[in-house]
Amino acid sequence: MNDKRFPNNGLLCAGILCVLVLLTVAAGCTANGPVTPAPQGAVTPEQVAVIAAANNCTDSGVTITDAVGTFRYTTTTNCSFTKTLVQLNASEMQEMKTLLEGKNMTCWYTKGNFDPRLVTSLVGGIEYCSGDLKDDITRLMLFT
Amino acid sequence: MRPVFLFSAGRNPFIQDILNSLLVMSRWMVGLIVVLAFMVPVAADNAASSWSWNTYRGTYLWQVTVIEDQSACGGGVYTNQYSVPIQYRGTTAVMGDVGHGSAGGTFTSGNILHIPGRSVADPPGSSTLSDYDVYFTADCTAFTAKYTWDYSGSDGSCSGSTTLNGASSSGCPAAAAVTTTAAQTTESSYAAMLTGPHSDLQNYLDLCAQRDQIDHAITAFEAQSSLNYRQTGSYLPEPAEITADRAQLAQVRARISDKGPEIEKDYTAVLVKDPNNFQANWDMAQLKKSEGQIEAGIGYANTAINNNLAGTAAEAMRRDFAEGNDLTTYPDPRNSNVVATIASTLPVAEQNVYGTDIRPSSGEPSTLTTLKDFMMYADPKEASREGNLVNQAVFGY
């Protein structure tokens, strides 16, 4: 029902697809549009520093930009961690930018037991958090 | 005319008269039965022909064939079948989701339901639907309807039409009181039974959130005090607010201990009669999650997503989110980097949620896996509120 198709000419589609693939290969790059998810697993030195500060429950504040956007991470001596989505990348649809930018979530943990996924991932570990950002991310799971 | 006597009783005329009278009576009885056999269906037909849906209150389940003509969009003509509940409320009715979301309308006559035009999200764009009439047959076996739509999105614009053909073999509700309609009424009565426990659960989940907040404040202080002990050989003096927190935490935990079993008992009362009840299983998943019984919560979550209302619930939640945030198109992994990232992250993240692996089990409907993800990740109160959307949409509670 929601599967609109434009256009209906199979040969034309195949031709366009071949040209696009060739252009992509020739450019020596992979697609970099909004469908490319943020890479997971690679931990930067800045992220390592945030994770250490969180584990030690020290006061800190660091801003890091990754493939999704720019995040502000703050940790406190009370073993609380706040993740704020400052800005989404320019390629993100405007409605999502309006929806998510400026929102945050706060997570509690015990000293030495901070979940590093809260820094390296958009989803991992958020079950222990609360806030507008967490609420929106969980609702967006329904659209995946 | 004198009847022909077939029996003979020897020479006793009295007995012979009795036997012949019985024979005459039996002939009349046979005649009467034959006449009645023809009269009853006629009477039934007359009763059916007087049926008007605009006087009925209750939910009735239709099997609907949806024919969508997308030929002007470069597509084809697609046919799908759905089980669609229509909630009749006297002069108004709400038709369940036939692909463009549920829709309310008003009866313009006994068996004609008028549904006004509206705009709906139709990812990756949106569609404007025309108003249309639903024509029900008076024998309650069918309905027909057709509306047109204008689609517009990032992939283009086009127009098409959707035809609905409803069918039911259950008969009119009065005649089917012990079959389909009774089942629907029962389901509706369960929804009514759950309004009280659902409200109690909201208060209970507030208590759980309060418990977690106080508990964290105490734990954070104790961690600092332990650190101070390791560094200086003495613990920190306990501040008055932490002492007050300890007293309050004990009170909150006592209330949780009292209320939890009461609420669970109310949900169990429904689950005993209807083990697959969507709302009860959904809310029990949140109750167990808030008690830290994650495995039990997953069990209830799995039962909920296997209920035939789960798809309707997921769509109701998506629509609620899109409308509540003024989204003109549904976000998805194709048009949103954030959603693409969530989609690619979930399969790994699912391996450890509250320390438990919640990845899909065999037999789990793959299209509803993310509904379970939402159930397990979301704030319990938020999730409980969302889970009630389907009851509001289908049963009006």
Image: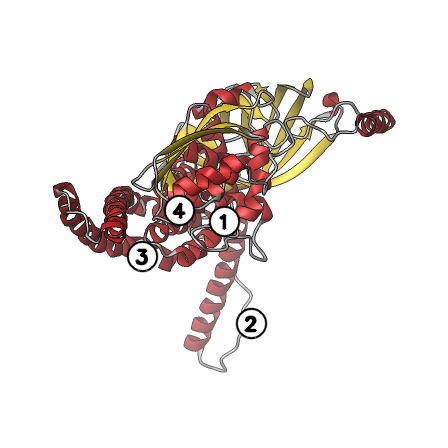
Q: Earlier in the sequence, mark 3 or mark 2?
A: 2
Instruction: Confirm or deny contact between disc 3 and disc 4 (CB under 8 A).
Output: no
Q: Is residue B81 left or right of residue B383?
A: right
Q: In the image, is residue A38 above or below residue B183?
A: above
Labels 3 and 4 in the same subunit: yes
Q: Nearer the viewer, residue B384 or B190?
A: B384
Among the 4 quarters of the image, the one containing residue A75: top left
Vertical order, B236 against A67 (above or below): below
- Indicate the quadrant containing the C terminus of chain B: top left, top right, bottom left or bottom right: top left
Mark 3 to mark 4: distance in Å? 13 Å
User: Dot 2 lies on which element?
Assistant: loop
Q: Nearer the viewer, residue A73 or B1?
A: A73
**Is label 4 or label 2 in front?**
4
Numbered disc total = 4
* Location of mark 1 (residue): B305
Residue annotated with mark 4: B279
Q: Secondary structure at mark 3?
A: helix
- Amino acid beneath label 1: Ile
Judge whether B46 appears above or below B227 on screen: above
Is A31 left, or right, of A84 in this rendering? Answer: right
Q: Earlier in the sequence, mark 1 or mark 3?
A: 3
Q: Position of residue B325 (x, y in %)?
A: 45, 23
Same chain? Circles 2 and 1 = yes
- Place of residue A98 in the rendered image (x, y in percent of width and height, measured from the top left): 48, 20
The residue that label 3 is drawn on is: B269
Tag 3: Cα neighbours inside 10 Å, few (<14), some, or many (≥20)? some
Label 4: how many Cα within 10 Å (few below 14, some 14–19, many 20+): many
Q: Secondary structure at mark 4?
A: helix
Q: Residue at x 32, y 46 (%)?
A: B194
Mark 2 lies on residue: B6
- Identify the image's colour scheme: rainbow, by chain, secondary structure or one colour: secondary structure
